[in-house]
Amino acid sequence: MRLDDSLIGAWSADCMYGPGAQSDDVLIFKEDGTGRFEFVNWVLCSADLFRWNVTESGSLNLTGYCCLQLDNDAQKVVSTESDFQYSSLSYRIAEEETRSGKRMRVLRLSWKLPASDHYGFVRRDLTGLEEPRFDIK
């Protein structure tokens, strides 16, 4: 399994736009070859857990193995099969000027999701982000 060290960490669609909104798409790539795609709307709503590897320079495989999401009443987390599957997904990381006025590393993906196709780098240290945290009472 080949991993690209420059992907490791947390990436956010919202962080590129300034003070932030109530919703965000977050990608997390961990050193052990696992990661997740999170949809946040005030709180974490869903997390697709995946395994990842690099097939060649600029090409990425994401293989989902579990989808966690809040139920309709937001009272419990439901686990289902993940359909988060991408083979030979093109990606690129480059320093860019963002709408927030900040210069940051930006990850661009060639996927066709109803989500962002570019993410700003938030941090490499994943302390506190090891597992998805759903805020249910």
Image (cartoon, rainbow, N blue to C red):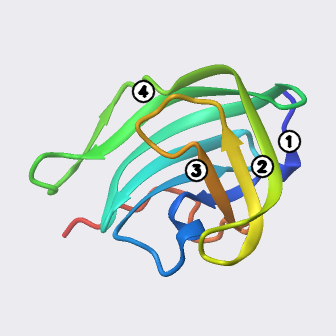
Sequence-wise first label, 1 or 4: 1
Q: Is residue 120 above or below residue 20?
A: above
Please report the residue visible at 60 percent of the width from the left and 69 percent of the height from the top.
99
Q: Residues within 10 Å of mark 3 (few under 14, many from 20)?
A: many
> Where residue 39 sits: x, y (%)?
40, 51
Kind of residue indicated by mark 1:
Asp
Q: CA distance from mark 4 to mark 3?
A: 15 Å
Mark 3 — residue?
27
Q: Is residue 70 left or right of residue 98?
A: left
The residue carrying pointer 4 sits among few (fewer than 14), some (14 to 19) or many (20 or more) residues within 10 Å by Cα, namely some
Picture quadrant where residue 42 is located: bottom left
Q: Which three-letter amino acid code belongs to the residue tagged 3?
A: Leu
Q: Which mark is residue 7?
A: 2
What residue does disc 1 label?
A: 4
Of the numbered discs 4 and 3, the one sitting upstream in the chain is: 3
Name which residue lies at 48% across and 81% down.
Answer: 19
Query: Of label 2 and label 4, which has the lower sequence position?
Result: 2
